[in-house]
Amino acid sequence: MNQIPLFNIFFNDGSNYQGGTLEQPKWLDIPDKPIRSIFYSLPLGDFLTLIGYEKYYHFVEVCKDLNGDRSGQVQLEFAYLIGKKGNDYRIYKISLRTGQIQIIDTDKDNEMIKQLNPIGWKKGI
């Protein structure tokens, strides 16, 4: 059975790149060339499309259960997809349990934005 890639990226030069899974997204393997658009697979089967940003960022938030039946297991909680335009950032916080998306508009002074590892930013148009 073919699994739908976590994301499909289309570059300005007409080429494309497919991401992996939530566990192994392959985000850091994206070629270093301008991204035209990203189609991101959502937990309930839809897609989120990002187009026209200067930079893009992606990461997955996980928790490790300390007690109970799942003690020691890693639980995927949220996926974050971020687009940057100028000093403005749009954060898509995707619940991997419910599929709900929270959209957060912020700027470069946001503490979470400041703490992101610079190697994760991918260039857009």
Image (tube, grey):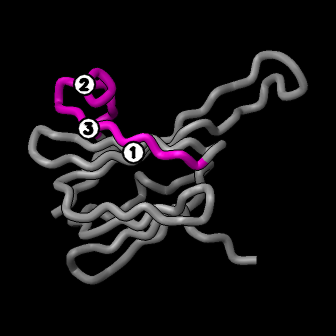
Which is more foreground, mark 3 or mark 2?
Answer: 3
Q: Earlier in the sequence, mark 1 or mark 3?
A: 1
Confirm whether the magenta stretch covers residue 79.
Answer: no
Q: Quadrant of residue 20?
A: bottom right
Classify the position of the C terminus by image quarter: bottom left
Q: Which residues are magenta?
A: 99-118
| Residue 100 sits above or below residue 15 on the image | above
What is the crowding at mark 1: few (fewer than 14 residues within 10 Å), some, or many (at least 20)? Answer: many
Q: Which residue is mark 3?
A: 105
Residue 119 vs residue 77, the one in the foreground: 77
Residue 110, numbered circle: 2
Which residue type does callout 3 highlight?
Asp
Confirm whether the magenta stretch covers residue 106.
Answer: yes
State if disc 2 and disc 3 touch (CB < 8 Å): no
3D distance between C-alphas at marks 3 and 2:
10 Å
The extreme right residue here reads 69
Classify the position of the N terminus by image quarter: bottom right
What is the crowding at mark 3: few (fewer than 14 residues within 10 Å), some, or many (at least 20)? Answer: few
Q: Residue at x 37, y 76 (%)?
A: 16
3D distance between C-alphas at marks 1 and 3:
9 Å
State if disc 3 and disc 1 touch (CB < 8 Å): no
Q: Position of residue 9 (x, y in %)?
A: 37, 69
Q: Position of residue 90 (x, y in %)?
A: 27, 44
Q: How many marks?
A: 3
Residue 83, numbered circle: none
Residue 92, numbered circle: 1
3D distance between C-alphas at marks 2 and 1:
14 Å
| Residue 103 sits above or below residue 26 on the image | above
Q: Residue at x 47, y 70 (%)?
A: 18
Q: Quadrant of residue 54?
A: bottom left
Q: Residue at x 52, y 62 (%)?
A: 41
